[in-house]
Amino acid sequence: MTKSKTIKVDYLARVEGEGALYIRYDDGGVHDVKLKIFEPPRFFEGFMRGRDYLEAPDITARICGICPVAYQMSSLHAMEDALGLTPTPELHALRRLIYCGEWIESHTLHIYMLHAPDFLGYPSAVAMAKDHPQIVQDGLQIKKAGNAIVNLLGGREVHPINVRVGGFYRVPTATELEPLREQLLKARDMAAATVRWAASLPFPDFERSVENQYEFVALSNEREYPMSCGRIASTRGLDIPVQEYDTHFREEHVEYSNALHSVLIERGAYFVGPMARYNLNYDRLSPLVRQTAEDIGFPPFCVNPFKSIVVRSLEVLYAFDEALRIIDNYRQPDTPYLVTEPRPSTGCAATEAPRGILYHRYSMDEEGKITDAKIVAPTSQNQKTIEDDLRLMLPKFLHLPEDKLQAQCEQAIRNYDPCISCSTHFLQLHMERRAREGQ
Amino acid sequence: MTDWAIISLGNRYRGDDGVGPFVLQRLRDRFGNSVDCIENSGDMTRLLEDWRDRHVCLVDAVSAEEREAGDIVLLDGLAEPMPPSLCGTSSHGFSLAEALELGRLFDSLPRRLAIYAICGENFANSAALSPAVEAAAVNVEKEILHLLTEQTGGPRCTNSP
């Protein structure tokens, strides 16, 4: 008769948010994978209604303590889209600079504190730090440089307050940016060393079969590696302006989760984040980053999600390189922000948060009161792909002892650096193994 | 940088999780620039820099089933173990307990760490503070004000004559 086996983990560490993952499988395969998110979703969208359009960047920045700049950027670009406003190149560069700071902060936190322990066999960054203190200290130093960028441009390190629709409340002088340059130069060297270190980690061997290839989706534009503008492109030919997002993407409610799963209409799951950006925009990385990737033998197109830690490290290197380029070419904007006048309108924008595309759409009335808001976070877009990864990779790892199998599943989830607080808080993992009848 | 710092953890737009920022804002209004008031919304690694070699009052919300909303738990963060309910709060996968452990490893600890943990009951986005939690917040504000007045001479007038 049935010989069942259950693996149950009540707390999946190093993932932000509250939810659970349930996997049911037997020797014949994986039968059920459900990523559950418990937190009541979408309150922020309702919370925004009736607020002034100028408040959107500061309010939505509170959705996440790790990527507030992304929320600010998507909301203000959406408002500017509604008002037909295009920021000047100088303001665009400054926005890009603060986004570099956030990519550095967020990616470095994930690389060193959350993901690296998986590869080195430690249950936590603290345990890893006892044996490898220099690794963790390097990570903290690199992250500090990212904090410095956000602090200078945003007015403070957490929840920047200097960003506004139309530009900034205050822009820095070239002299104010100069001290940052020295710090970034040193940190860029450390970031290059991080790439080499990350590439030396032991990676589980996992690639999807031809019929289950990922559809990577990211912003793409001809001028630059995408951060705050571009068309939405995919590895299966999607190439649309952001304004057509709602025509091509749909959010589906699944019974077991409060978060909506985002899918490509008639195609299903897709993959956003660093790997998608990298695969679709490799040629727009700086020469230093492409050369570094080449030096470590890392391909321009990566399909092993466990190697996302290398891609993140390359993006950190890029963010330093780009930040330095922006500082070296800095021209102080004539005016810190473009004046805006509200009008009845609807606008949308997608920017590249550290974890992938972050889509915002707002409508406002003639007084600039927000009448409707829609926010689609990267993690809700990746949820279905995370589930599919687990479904597809588990058969390959069933020979592993249960504790190792469980660790492999957790590591696979962390490949996506999921921020469940953004998508709707705490991940609990439940795995149930059932032997087939007669065994 | 001041010798004393007040640090809040939590998100002001998530119901009772916002009690830390709520207390911080009230104390910032009292102390002006004479005490650093630092709002931390989830990145615990920042604590290593923010609290190093300083005297710190840290205010956070906790969810503890065995306690009533509005209960205040005062802990000596350097001497007492962190209760589990303070280990998993709004940390992006990295907890206050881990920040303390890393601080010990890297010699980045505060000289004093008074943790004011206020028990909450409603952590929903956009919810207001629960009445019991708001009342507790006012008491914590008074306690910190009293402590800092004893230690630093209290709030200074920052207005120019």
Image: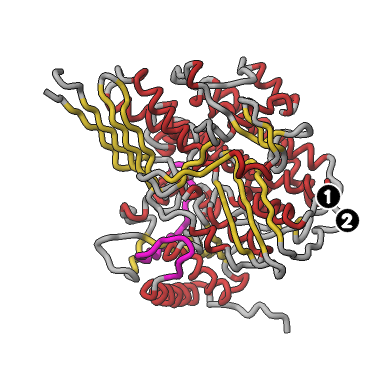
| Residue, disc 2 | A334
| Magenta stretch in the rendered image | B104-129
Residue B23 is a magenta residue: no
Q: Which residue is mark 1?
A: A88
Q: Is residue B2 visible?
A: yes
Q: B35 and B10: which one is in front? A: B10
Instruction: Residue at 58% x, 21% y: name it.
Output: A302
Using the image, name the chain to which the residue with label 1 belongs: A
The residue depicted at 45 percent of the width and 17 percent of the height is A205
Give the amino acid at mark 1. Answer: Thr
Q: Is residue B127 above or below residue A391?
A: below
Decide which of tag 2 and tag 1 comes sooner along the chain.
1
Q: Quadrant of residue A350?
A: top right
**Pointers 2 and 1 within a single chain:** yes
Q: Residues within 10 Å of mark 1 (few under 14, many from 20)?
A: some
Q: Amino acid at mark 2?
A: Asp
Nearest the viewer among B61 and A190 is B61
Q: Residue at x 32, y 56 (%)?
A: B80
User: Dividing the picture into quarters, in which one does residue A394 lie?
Assistant: top left
Q: Is residue B126 magenta?
A: yes
